[in-house]
């Protein structure tokens, strides 16, 4: 059996170890961590929470620190195609062979303790990074923050990227509750970066009560970017860094995340970074399916945008491309998302909709998506007629049917879920 096949067996196996997909407690995973690495870890930790922008911020922080000459690790989720994508050492995915060893080590340490899929995966990351003796590990929270498995590590710097309504059944249905869960990654007397100009009061109260000094966007650090300029600048106190490249070569839609990433790197203790490393790190950062333009004639844009805030950002990016032809959308989303509210940001300029089912316990059927699309049209107030959407059971088939229809001036948006974008 190939290593890839063995790895898939492990991935399938760890989905069976707990009767719940999500179990927001830390006691079990903490117990296994202490068995696995009783000495703890000796690397610096940058922990990232937030509704959107976590993966992009993690990539930029990791790339900047790598450009500065540090041995870096990055843990993100979910993956698009390969489980290995979740684990990087110095910008390179961990090999099947190393992952198989880590699976075995965590399984031995686990004993009879039930772990969720994400908890097991997080312990794999910590085990791999500790053994690699990295200087800094960039850890992306999976859900929430306070009770997420990643939070068993004490963050040297915490970063809350953004806040909006998502996962409300787990985190609460207002920003005060959600903010309190996210800020739970911050530690007393250690720095925290907040990528919000007006954070909820619960976040500010938590920082004050726990002697955390937050660095807030717009108050403690900021950025400037002129429209159509290929460079931007970052400011913090008396320091200014000019001629920074746009993240991923885009139109500026990632700048708040990039500014926060620079602030995180500035605050990591004992790991100084020079200005040229910020420029080089941002220029080298790359992450698939974040407003990613994979073709220009026609435009094909893929994005894992899956909630209202991120779809709004996608709509702004599409407008910046000045599409001359027709705009097609291929979308599939999970049922627990704000589907109608998200689609409403695109219905004004999408000419033809193609909807695909997502086949898992949280996925929406294409027919259900069509109902949400009708609601989105009503929300948007659009008066121009939209043809009835075409529904597919398989996203790949939808993509294959769509591609020959596209003319050079047209645009296709592929978005809505990691699952759909990963399939394509």
Image (tube, rainbow, N blue to C red):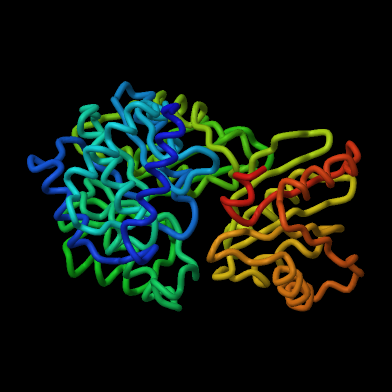
Q: List x then y, in percent, for residue 148.
A: 30, 59
**218 relative to 233, above or below:** below
Q: Using residue 11 as the reference point, say whether residue 166 is left or right of it.
A: right
Q: Residue furthest front?
A: 1
As drawn, which residue projects farthest toward the top? 69
Q: Position of residue 240 (x, y in %)?
A: 41, 37
Q: Quadrant of residue 102?
A: top left
Residue at (20, 34) in percent of width and height: 130
301 and 197: which is toward the camera: 301
Q: For the N terminus, which image quadrant?
A: top left
Residue name at image x 42 percent, y 58 percent = 50
**Residue at point 78% right, 75% down?**
374
Percent coordinates x, y for residue 362 in the rendering: 54, 66
Counting every numbered tag in the picture gives 0
Depicted 417 relative to depicted 382: above or below = above
Percent position (x, y) of residue 7? 40, 36
The answer, for residue 372, to whether it is visible in the render is: yes
Image position of 276 (left or right of 351): left
| Residue at 28 percent of width and 31 percent of height | 101
Q: Where is the C terminus found, in terms of image quarters?
A: top right
Horizontally, is 379 left or right of 134 in the view?
right
User: Quadrant of the rendered structure where residue 133 is?
Assistant: top left
Which of the 4 image quarters holds residue 230?
Answer: top right
Most foreground residue, 25 or 11 = 11
Q: Is residue 216 visible?
A: no
Side of 311 relative to 398 (left or right) = left
Q: In the picture shown, does residue 229 fall above or below 390?
A: above
């Amino acid at each position: 059996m190939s290593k890839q096949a063995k790895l898939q067996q492990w991935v399938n196996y760890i989905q069976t170890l707990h009767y719940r997909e999500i179990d927001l407690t830390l006691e079990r995973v903490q117990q296994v961590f202490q068995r696995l690495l009783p000495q703890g870890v000796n690397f610096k930790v940058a922990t990232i929470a937030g509704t959107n922008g976590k993966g992009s911020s993690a990539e930029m922080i990791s790339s900047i620190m790598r450009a500065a000459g540090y041995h870096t690790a990055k843990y993100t989720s979910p993956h698009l195609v390969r489980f290995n994508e979740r684990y990087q050492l110095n910008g390179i995915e961990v090999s099947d062979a190393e992952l198989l060893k880590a699976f075995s080590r965590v399984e031995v340490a686990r004993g009879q303790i039930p772990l969720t899929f994400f908890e097991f995966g997080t312990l794999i990351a910590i085990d791999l990074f500790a053994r690699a003796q990295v200087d800094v590990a960039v850890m992306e929270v999976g859900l929430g923050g306070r009770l997420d498995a990643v939070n068993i590590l004490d963050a040297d710097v915490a970063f809350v990227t953004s806040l909006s309504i998502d996962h409300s059944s787990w985190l609460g249905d207002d920003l005060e509750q959600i903010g309190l869960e996210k800020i739970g990654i911050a530690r007393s007397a250690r720095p925290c970066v907040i990528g919000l100009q007006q954070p909820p009061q619960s976040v500010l109260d938590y920082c004050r009560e726990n002697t955390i000094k937050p660095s807030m966007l717009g108050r403690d650090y900021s950025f400037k970017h002129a429209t159509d300029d290929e460079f931007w600048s970052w400011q913090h106190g008396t320091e200014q860094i000019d001629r920074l490249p746009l993240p991923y070569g885009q139109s500026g839609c990632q700048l708040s995340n990039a500014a926060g990433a620079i602030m995180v790197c500035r605050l990591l203790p004992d790991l100084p970074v020079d200005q040229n490393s910020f420029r080089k790190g941002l220029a080298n950062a790359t992450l698939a399916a974040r407003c990613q333009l994979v073709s220009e004639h026609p435009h094909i844009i893929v994005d894992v945008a899956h909630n209202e805030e991120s779809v709004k950002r996608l709509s702004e990016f599409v407008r910046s491309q000045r599409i001359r032809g027709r705009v097609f959308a291929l979308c599939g989303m999970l049922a627990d998302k704000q589907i109608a509210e998200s689609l409403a940001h695109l219905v004004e300029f999408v000419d033809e909709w193609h909807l695909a089912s997502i086949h898992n316990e949280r996925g929406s059927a294409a027919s259900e998506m069509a109902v949400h699309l009708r609601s989105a049209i009503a929300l948007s107030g659009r008066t121009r007629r939209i043809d009835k959407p075409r529904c597919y059971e398989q996203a790949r088939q939808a993509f294959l049917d769509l591609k020959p229809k596209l003319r050079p001036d047209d645009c296709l948006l592929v978005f809505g879920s990691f699952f759909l974008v990963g399939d394509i």
